[in-house]
Amino acid sequence: MGTLSGRAPLLNRERERAELDGLLGDVRSGRGRVLVLRGEAGVGKSALLRHTVGRATDMRVVRTVGAESEMELAFAGLHLLLTPLLDRIEKLPGPQRDALAVAFGLHTGDAPDRFMIGLAVLTLLAEAAEERALLCVIDDAQWLDQSSAQVLAFVARRLLAEPVGLIFAAREPGEQFHGLVDLEVRGLAEQDAQALLRSVVRFPLDERIRARILAETNGNPLALLELPRGMSPAQLAGGFGLVEAQAVPARVEEGFRRRLAALPAETRSLMLIAAAEPTGDPVLIWRAAGRLGVPASAVEPAQADGLLELGAWARFRHPLVRSAVYSAASLSERRAAHGALAAATDPASAPDRRAWHRAHAALESDESVAGELEQLADRAQVRGGIAAAAAFLRRATELTPDPARRGARALAAAQATFGAGAPDMALELLTSAEMGPLTEFQRGRAAWLRAQVVFARRRGGEALPPLLEAADRLARVDAGQAREAYVDAIGSAVFAGRLGEPGLLRTVAEAARTAPAGPQPARPVDALLDGLVARFAEGFGESAPRLKRVLLTFRQEAQRNPDDNMRRLWLTHLVAADLWDDQTLHELAAYAVQAAREIGALSFLPQALTYRAAVHIYAGQFDAAAALVEESDAILKVTGHAYYGFASSLLLGWRGDAEALAQFEAAAEWSSTWGEGRAISGCFFMSALAYNAIGKYQDALAQAERACEHDDLGLTGYVLVELVEAAAYSNTPEAATTALRRLEERTTASGTDWALGVLARSKALLSGGQAADLLYREAIERLQRSRAAVYLARTHLVYGEWLRRENRRLDAREHLRTAYEMLQGFGAQAFADRAHRELLAAGDTVRKRTAGTPDGLTPQEGQIARLARKGLSNPEIGAQLFLSPRTVEYHLSKVFTKLAITSRNQLAQALPVQDHDGA
């Protein structure tokens, strides 16, 4: 739906025009630029957009305008924007082409992830910009449907080296656009405002009245143009026609209402139909008008008054005109307009809009309309429009006459609404559903969803009681879902950690033990539940064999059933870490990242990247880990989901940055506020790790002992390693012996080379003579067979330190030099400094090197370089990292410059071979 909002002159807008002209200049030079114009209605945003489009005659321009009535229609705004470019859709890579085609209803297929759609849009824009620079203009962005807004915000954050400009104009940009470069469009300066007022009020005004108008319109150009209209000179001169104090847009809208009231009834009816049909299709509008008996001449008064043009497209003077038309109409008039539009809309080509108009036309409960909306919700979900599906289901619920069916639809609406990121509304719908005659199964599902909402908000123990209640309800009607709810309950207790009641995990495990047998054939999640019950009800040693089989099952199923691997990675990763199972950690994280990239699951990818980054850290591949953390953070800025701070904190701890200690302390306080006791233990562990790195062993011991106060899944074993080292170096034998005993129970039950390697290392720290020597050698031998390079390097370090104290200086230098080279290469600077000090004490004169990515590559440049070294093309790299091929090319050119090379073939020699597994 277009507008005619740009009739006011731009006047003095040097600041805004300079910024927009700068954007055009950057785009012409091949650089992607984004700008969000924000300001109240009527302040001149649309006029600035028109000015910019007028200066972009050498560019291709595509435009769309958000429509309030289309906010529930998935991808409506995006489709309108990209329609001129869709002839290029076949040039997109297959998965991107299919995702965009399904989203726009051009093809049928599985529901695409909305960020795979985002990558498709990014690629499409970059492809179109290859011929000539491209300018995308989105007015009234505050009214974009949620799916379109999320995709366009994703694209905005990934533009870099493409000659594409993206300009949004919004009264108040939605949260998706927060963080993008914005420019506030303010009211006119007083001198310009006076000039504009004089242009519409051509008779003398009392200075006090003029001052009041100028003050209360706050320089808003549309208000200055519209407020005086419809008032007589006497009213204006005396100030009697001025509206009492209210917001400027409301005043302008009220002025439009006054003008509407003076128009013939048939003209108002035609304008109402145009206001209710956001596409602005004149054929459809006239067809609907004909059903209400509105003659063709009805448009003339509206056009004469400058409020509406109905030519090739319906265009209102300003969105506030459209708003005034719709709000001024009575409910019966609105229903009549929507009914006429529904009857005039082709059900084959536009079923979404037809059903939506029918829903707005319904006077009372109507099962046929509700059923159509329910089918429409299914279609929206298939297209990836979860927010639209939720809206259709909510309206379907309102129109459903049968109480039982209404409850079922309310439950489905609650599920979809939660998935769309609106937990408060989901809870309201759940309350509505629970007031109806639900079945036992439906009540169990409702209880589980309510608990999931709580768990999503606060992952600690607050969600535990409702999760257990849901599991108990479901146990009577659906064993499979009951067992999944019990897995969630155990997960909630794991996250609650030390903040839960004493013995909480055992209590929850005993409750889960009562769950009915799972469905056949057996599912991996059922084995996971049984293994977790054994872990917390029977102990580490007793559960280890069962959990090893569980992990093997998940490894075998990871490629065949990637969805299950992704859904359960948050728990299977912790179990694998608990068992020191480096191979499973590697495989599950690698498969999860691969699957998430292939299907474009950006809602899950940041979590997978975080766990994959942790695997890289253990392997000493800090640069690869940093690149994944950076990628995860960039995606989370787009999705708005909570950050996963684990990998970035682990990286800080291993690097031994002293400044990180204050961050860990602050993070522990934050975790306490959110009820996440396990995260508090994690902060204590990372502090102990950092203190050991810088040689403050008493402090490391204190932090490790605090971390060990609670047995945390996937964490306590690693804390015990730090505790043994800190206690040994601070001459606290009792603490060291107790910690070693606990560590031995775990590592022996695990039996991996990683586990037995750190056990031998820890025993060596508390031994002497030949026994210590043999244990250090065993530790090195075992850790060399594992992926835990950081622990291998630290074993060389403590072995070298012991050898120096034994006056075996030559042997000490060998291991200390190995430790130093490894740790320095990883980027574990504090540990490397510790090795360097020991080397000097052993009489070696090794030159201190600077750690970091070679020749100053950023983490993202390093990641792209490693993928290029593996032979991936620019489009393949772009698909993995959600970048356009042109942006990949831009980064690679910087890599070549920094490494002083000229081709991809030279990357193998120019880059250190740290990362054998890729990113």
Image (spheres, helix red, strand yellow):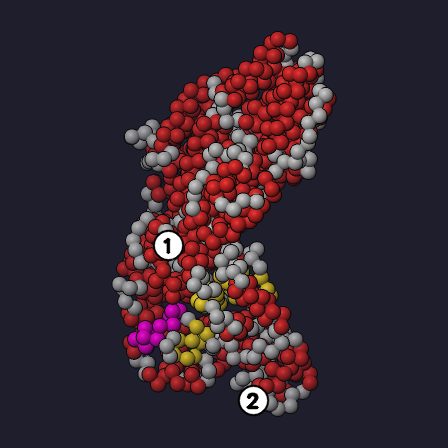
Please tell me whether residue 437 belongs to the stretch shown in magenta: no
Of 316 and 871, the residue lying toward us: 871
Identify the magenta region: 277-287
Q: Mark 2, residues whose alpha carbon is within 10 Å: few (<14), some, or many (≥20)?
A: few
Residue 8, image x, y percentages: 55, 79
- Is residue 267 depicted above or below 465 in this figure? below
Residue in view at x 42 percent, y 38 percent: 592
- Badge 1 element: loop
Inspect the image, locate mark 1, and give the three-letter code of the amino acid beneath it: Leu
Q: Is residue 251 above or below residue 658?
A: below
Residues at marks 1 and 2, CA–CA distance in whole angstroms: 60 Å
Horizontal side of 225 relative to 467 (left or right) equals right
Q: Residue at x 66, y 20 (%)?
A: 813
* Residue 604 numbered mark, or none: none
Figure quadrant of residue 500: top right
Q: Quadrant of the N terminus?
A: bottom left
Residue 185 seen in render? no
Q: Could you tell which of marks 1 and 2 lies nearer the N-terminus? A: 1
The residue to which callout 1 is attached is 92
Residue indicated by mark 2: 232
